[in-house]
Amino acid sequence: MPVELPRLPRLGTVSKRLPEIFPESVEQRNYCVREMAARTIWVMLYAGAVRGNDRWIRPSQVTDMGRAQARRVAAEERDAWYRLTLSARKARPAWYAPNSREPIRDETLRQGLVPTGAVIDRPDLPTTSSLPRYALDAQFAALFDEALEPRAFSGAAETWRAAHLSKTALARLALRSRSARVTKGVVSARLPNGETRNLTPGPSASIAKALLEEFAPRFLHTPALLWLSESGNKVVASDDSTAAKIGLKIDPGRALPDVILADLGPELLVVFAEIVATNGAITEIRKRNLSAIAVDAGFDAAHLAFVSAFEDRASGGYRKNVSNLAWDSFAWFASEPDRLIMLRGGSPVPIATLR
């Protein structure tokens, strides 16, 4: 039965569209948007390996594609190439060396395109089989139709993401989209006591809003805001009376963090938090200096916690700062508000006790 080959886009079109199809909220995004991914997808389109065609490829066929063959786009030339590359006879030179099939298989496909649903893995083959097993999801393949105008493509990509990406990825995408829009106007943040404060628009404001509205009620029993500042506005909100009641004197003249929260019960805790859009995470030096502020004010160091708040695990701010985060501090992400990373220091303990 003849295979209906899809219209073949330019390789540049595939490369250009992948970053929009897979925004930065997607885990293992690099494997989905790099040039190797674009070429893998293009070869699948070239071969007609699309769900419904009962035609599949193996990674070696991607390494067998080359510039000369890529210019042969007639249906009969594409079909002949597909059959040739499944035989013992190979056409060289090609885009990649033969041993490049491992990163295509293990990274681009198994860690990138297959988990997102962009590529399907033939279900009737054992994992050790050398037979061709990969094909494009039909709706995903349609995203590279060059007849799609930019607006239509964006709408189709959004529809595909909603149907295929995980709930976590979609939530992270929604958060990043909201953050990108917060560039004008006013960002209104609800404080733990129910009051609201207006913050200067921007990525930091979006993270600060999430820290107050999402982190505080999730991870503190009885949250209270003691201090909130932002760049260019030293004091946005403060509660000196609550700070005084728990024995913490806040001196605005000192190098305070962006946010100071308190958990008023059942065990008193003071939480120093930094909002990290690009810089300013809780490092060892920063943690030591903040601890000194609390101890100098007569507060017990055993009742302190330190949090670096980021937009997302894939954000530049986190990637830039993660290697310098202080031990015995926490990393929290606005895009995944129920999750918290603890950098545990001190003496080693059996991992079973940490589960």
Image: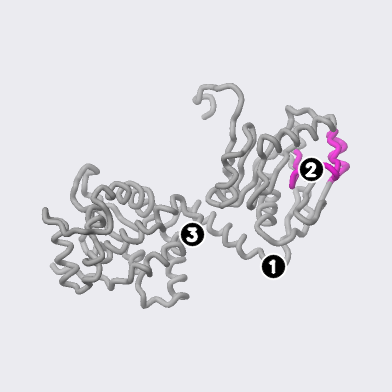
The residue under the point 60% across, 28% down is 345
| Identity, as a three-letter code, of the amino acid under mark 3 | Pro
x, y (%) of residue 352? 49, 25
Look at the image and tell me whether residue 122 can be seen: no
Q: Was residue 240 drawn as part of the magenta stretch in this picture?
A: yes
User: Residue at horizontal 59%, vertical 35%?
Assistant: 342
Between 103 and 56, the one nearer to me in the picture: 103
Instruction: Give the residues drawn in magenta, as a range.
Output: 239-262
| Crowdedness near tag 2: few (<14), some (14–19) or many (≥20) residues, C-alpha within 10 Å | few
Q: Pointer 1: residues within 10 angstroms few (<14), some, or many (20+)?
A: few
Q: Of tags 2 and 1, which is closer to the observer?
A: 2
Which residue is painted at 25% across and 67% down in the image? 70
| Relative vertical location of residue 141 with respect to residue 204 in this rendering, above or below | below
Dot placed on the residue nearer the N-terminal end, 1 or 3: 3
x, y percentage for residue 312? 57, 50
- Amino acid type of the residue tagged 1 in the rendering: Lys
Is 96 displayed left or right of 15 in the figure?
Answer: left
* Residue at the image point whose x is 32% and y is 57% from the top: 119
Q: Secondary structure at mark 2?
A: loop
Residue 324 position in % (x across, y down): 60, 39
Residue 94 lies, in percent from the top left, at: 24, 59
Q: Is residue 308 visible?
A: yes
- Residue 325 against residue 177 in the figure, above or below: above
Q: What residue sits right under mark 3 in the picture?
A: 23
Marker disc for residue 184: 1
Q: CA distance from mark 3 to mark 2?
A: 36 Å
What residue does disc 2 label? Answer: 255
Considering every residue shown, the one lying at the far front of the view is 93
